[in-house]
Amino acid sequence: MPPVILAIESSCDETSAAIIRSGKVLNNVVASQQVHRKYGGVVPELASRAHQRNIHDVVNEAMASAGVQVSELDGIAFTKGPGLMGALLVGSSFAKGMSLALGKRLIGVNHMEAHVLAHFIKATPDATVPSFPFLCLTVSGGHTQIVLVKDVLDMKVIGETKDDAVGEAFDKAAKILGLPYPGGPLINQHATDGNAGAFHFPATQVPGLDFSFSGIKTAFLYFIRDQKAINPEFVGERMKDICASLQKHLINMLMQKLELASAMTGIRHVAIAGGVSANTLLRQELKRRGEELGWSTHIPPFEYCTDNAAMVAMAAHFKYEASRFEPLDTAPEPGLALSA
């Protein structure tokens, strides 16, 4: 019988649960944590406490809305890592408890692997999935990677950031501008009507397919400081142009490496994934450059860009089919590598 799996995501500040039956995701219940806004970033201790409050209700809602009884479940999946240790412990402990109590298979999922496999969620009947092998630019607040995807469970990181993730660069720049957390989406909004050529920032040169975003953060900090020394109202008066210029610079850094990866590997099937893949300019640039370079491009629906259990469920389905299960004494791994 095709498996029915309950999946749980709790790697950072989203508590989520989803049900997948026969490879089809039935729902995706997400409880967001608003408590972090006033602190300008995710506070790990507060995140784990919020997961504890939310996880029971989120799982119950996922089960009820899918019309699935616990007796019908074949497996319980959870995000094993990477992520915040306290947050991962909540999800893994809940999943292990259900697995033990119900006698169901336990499936540990790599969070970054799940982002890539979100492309295999058939959101609509006519949705297409990437052909193997393909390249996936996986971009979020914690990661920036170019992944060579040979098969659903055969992936290799061929390029990654050497310091900060691009999502962090967006958020830190937003904080410098006085925008609330999370700032990345707000920069995207302000950039819509801005002049992307108004300001220029120094390019960061890193060999091969790797990235570095620490330099642009520092350059942006000094740029805003110097401009405000000349005109204290600079940020308020030029917010749209500042955001558009910075966004263009960061997206160009991503796309240049993605183009290089395609040229080096000869692969023309290209995808994006992760929270930053919701960025409007990134989605537009992937389509535009794909048309110019003859790529087959794949962009996930917005609801599967940020952290969610539907992508964990999709990864768990493939792992169940491959009989890749976890023992009950398994533990979360905050630094879990994609190849693990």
Image (cartoon, rainbow, N blue to C red):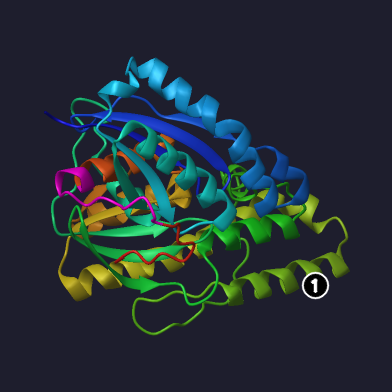
Label 1 belongs to which residue?
Answer: 226
Q: Is residue 21 above or below residue 311?
A: above
Image coords of residue 188 (percent x, y)? 57, 47
What x and y, as percent, mark residue 178?
A: 77, 52
Q: Please identify the quadrant where the N terminus is shown.
A: top left
Q: Nearer the viewer, residue 218 or 181?
A: 181
Chief secondary structure of the magenta span?
A: loop
Q: Residue at x 85, y 55 (%)?
A: 233
| Badge 1: residue crowd in 10 Å (few <14, some 14–19, many ≥20) | few
State which quadrant residue 215 falls in: bottom right
Which three-letter amino acid code belongs to the residue tagged 1?
Asp
Q: Position of residue 113 (x, y in %)?
A: 32, 55
290 horizontally vs 91: left or right: left
Does the magenta run of residues contain 322?
yes
Which element is circle 1 on? helix
The reply to whether residue 69 is visible in this rendering is yes
**Residue at 37% across, 39% down:** 100
Q: Quadrant of the C terminus?
A: bottom left
> Magenta stretch containing residue 114, yes or no?
no
Picture quarter containing residue 254? bottom left
Image spot of residue 67 (x, y percent)? 33, 14
- Depth check: 74 or 156 in front? 74
Q: Which residue is nearer to you in this view: 143 or 252?
A: 143
Say how many tags the image has.
1
Q: Residue at x 63, y 33 (%)?
A: 53
Q: Left of 119 or right of it: where is 62?
A: right
Question: Farthest residue toward the bottom?
Answer: 207
Horizontal side of 289 relative to 279 (left or right) equals left
Q: Magenta segment, which residues?
A: 319-330
Residue 308 shows up from this direction = no
